[in-house]
Amino acid sequence: AQTVTQSQPEMSVQEAETVTLSCTYDTSESDYYLFWYKQPPSRQMILVIRQEAYKQQNATENRFSVNFQKAAKSFSLKISDSQLGDAAMYFCAYRSRGSQGNLIFGKGTKLSVKP
Amino acid sequence: GAVVSQHPSRVICKSGTSVKIECRSLDFQATTMFWYRQFPKQSLMLMATSNEGSKATYEQGVEKDKFLINHASLTLSTLTVTSAHPEDSSFYICSATYTVPFIGYTFGSGTRLTVV
């Protein structure tokens, strides 16, 4: 069975600085999707970024980028120029390409942004 | 973009009563709906998966008779917590997707259930 591990329960970053959130996963599959979701205090789940395993190029979305290391089964999220609104829980998630489609979530990392 | 409307956002009910939570996909047809439960400061725990027109598939340890899921149409799925007890108090979130082709997931805004 696939598992997702986020080893940093909490992280803190100074406003305008850069922070990297770690995520590793375990799978025997070769084709899958990886996601980072943000859950602010409102608890609405917001997609931050998505990566398809067959794509070698790391996904980017404005200030958010990932470092996808398929062989190492690592999928870290880098947030550049951190803003106060980035403060939230961040969840890394995995989805098999061929499954019925449920997401497997990590335990989350709580990110605080200091002004 | 794709929107899933989840209602109610908050509900307080008495122990022993039933509560229904609705999730509607507003601008796409959700072939699959996932229901999650989230305890404070924890991750989302998948409770069940429902495909339109089929019986839901429940995760191990989730009581199917307590958590009734209906997905009768491509735009509506409901979760009914029957004979609720205080230990059922939690945050419930739905997530919809169109699996073929896979387009991603859209989450509802969640329902905070408090059983008194």
Image: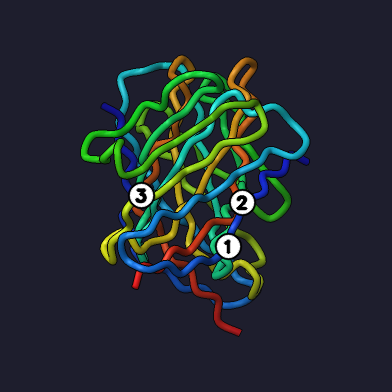
Is the residue marked by circle 3 packed among few (<14), some (14-19), or many (20+) residues within 10 Å? Answer: some
Is the residue B101 above or below the residue A80 in the image? above
Co-location on one chain, circles 3 and 2: yes
Q: Is the residue under label 1 in contact with that under label 2 (CB below 8 Å)?
A: yes
Q: Which residue is mark 1?
A: B9
In the image, B24 versus B3, the foreground residue is B24
Q: Position of residue B1 (x, y in %)?
A: 78, 41
* Left or right: A41, with A75 as reference point: right
- The answer to whether one can see residue B14 in this image is yes
Residue A87, given in percent of the width and then of the height, sits at 56, 70
| Residue furthest out toward the left | B61
Which residue is depicted at the point 33% across and 31% down?
A: B58
Chain ID for label 3?
Answer: B
Residue B75 appears left or right of A91: right
Instruction: State the CA–CA distance, disc 3 to disc 2.
Output: 18 Å
User: Residue A76 at x, y = what percent?
Assistant: 47, 47
Is A7 placed left or right of B104 in the picture? left
Disc 1: which chain? B
- Chain for numbered disc 2: B
Kind of residue at disc 3:
Thr
What's under tag 2, amino acid-wise? Gln
Q: Are both tags, 1 and 3, on one chain?
A: yes
Mark nearer the N terminus (1 vs 3) = 1
The residue type indicated by label 1 comes to Ser
Q: CA distance from mark 1 to mark 3?
A: 18 Å
Quadrant for residue A54, please give it. Answer: top right
Task: For label 2, count other residues whose C-alpha is less than 10 Å away and answer few (under 14), some (14-19) or many (20+).
Answer: many
Q: Which residue is mark 3?
A: B82
